Image (spheres, grey):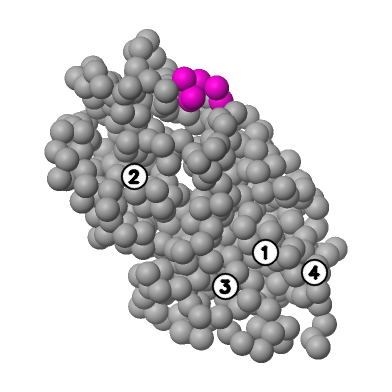
Amino acid sequence: MAQRKKIMVIFGTRPEATKMGPVVQELRRHPEWFETKVIVTGQHKEQLDQALSHFGIQPDVDLTLMKEQQTLAYLTSAAITGLDSIISEEKPDLIFIHGDTQTTLCGGLVAFLHKIKVAHIEAGLRSHNKYSPWPEEINRKLVDGIADFLFAPTMNSRDNLLREGFSESTIFVSGQTAIDAAIKANRSDYTFNEGKITQILNQKSKVITMTVHRKENYGAPMLRMFRAIRRLADDHPDISIIYPVHLSPIVRETAFQTLSGHERIHLLDPIDYSDMINLIARSYLLLSDSGGLQEEAPVFHKPLVLMRDTTERPEAVSAKAVYLAGTEEEDIYAVTTKLLKDKSFYNTMQNAENPFGDGEASRRIVQFIAHHFGLISEVPEPFHA
């Protein structure tokens, strides 16, 4: 029997935590295989803590880097310094990182500098526009170049990597771990921690859940989005809009200036992961510029109007689960109105197949790594949509 291996899992934001949470849980189901260490940078703080609590994860180290008005340069330098010290001390056999954040970039870079193998979950996503999503598109490409194991969520992501010259032997199609988390979090008997959500859901209106936070949409694009949403609420008395407003001061200022004061637009503070998933499951449709919501919406067959000019998840658009509307006010207003009025159009999006996963991605990833280290004899079957 091969010797037990030390695995370090590094993340720093709420989206990373919700997608890495199932992987940490799966790693810890096998203490005979792995000693698992969780390191968080605190790139986000309150929202990260909420997600950690949901998965029952207590970090082994929290760098608590978040500060007001933090810049990407500050985060990058602080995370590299903090992670370098920890990795030097722990000397793990493998480091897991996820996606495209500054924490991910720094974790991969420091691991490389210490010649420690890197497993990149959610590899191969591409928008082919280096400024959208920004800085995530370049972060992800850089991390893919560092990684030894590339866990692509879909065949499309795998094909992106192959076109860029990555060896097929380093790529494994795992499915998306966000699907694992979402399936487990949704419950028919769920009680919301944010009581106002229950009050809104008990009304007769169609509930639209929205999220807006992307940096590349700051300024004029975000203002156009919010104007479209305000018009939708004015023109459709049968809808209610729930918007848990991101903590970014820029987002909050624009949101409250444009959307507050309307009786059917409900501006909430950020809600925890369980509330968000169960709200998505009970919504009529979704409006967002989020990356992760593109994966979660098809799980619950909720049409998503994506308020972005590009997407690194084209599978959802191809499947007709997501409509890429751009950031122009008229386009957002028109397609959302069509979803509210045209039942055939709504049904087409509602009935789209989920291209991202089946709830088994975390198991596949952990078994693949266990096989690599000689802990089990068989390689798991890859995900097929």
Q: Quick one: label 1, few (<14), some, or many (20+) residues within 10 Å?
A: some
> Residue 250: horizontal and vertical position, in percent?
46, 27
Residue stretch rendered in magenta on the structure: 194-199
Q: Are the residues at dot 2 and dot 3 in contact (C-beta closer than 8 Å)?
A: no
What amino acid does circle 3 point to?
Arg
Q: Which residue is drawn at 57% across and 73% down?
A: 364
Q: Earlier in the sequence, mark 1 or mark 3?
A: 1
Does dot 4 land on a helix, a strand or a loop?
A: loop
Does dot 2 land on a helix, a strand or a loop?
A: loop
How far is mark 1 from mark 2, CA to CA? Answer: 28 Å
What amino acid does circle 4 point to?
Pro
Q: Which residue is drawn at 21% across and 47% down?
A: 347
Quick one: quadrant of the C terminus? bottom left
Closer-to-camera residue (41/6): 6
Which residue is label 3 attached to?
364
Q: Which mark is residue 31?
A: 4
Q: Which mark is residue 26?
A: 1
How far is mark 4 from mark 3, CA to CA? Answer: 17 Å
How far is mark 1 from mark 4, CA to CA? Answer: 10 Å
Query: Which residue is the extreme one toward the front?
Result: 189
Q: Which of marks 1 and 2 is nearer the N terminus?
A: 1
How far is mark 2 from mark 3, CA to CA? Answer: 27 Å
What amino acid does circle 2 point to?
Lys
Task: Specify whether residue 50 is painted magenta.
Answer: no
Q: Earlier in the sequence, mark 1 or mark 4?
A: 1
Image quarter of residue 98: bottom right
Q: In this view, does 9 lie above or below 62?
A: below
Closer-to-camera residue (195/123): 195
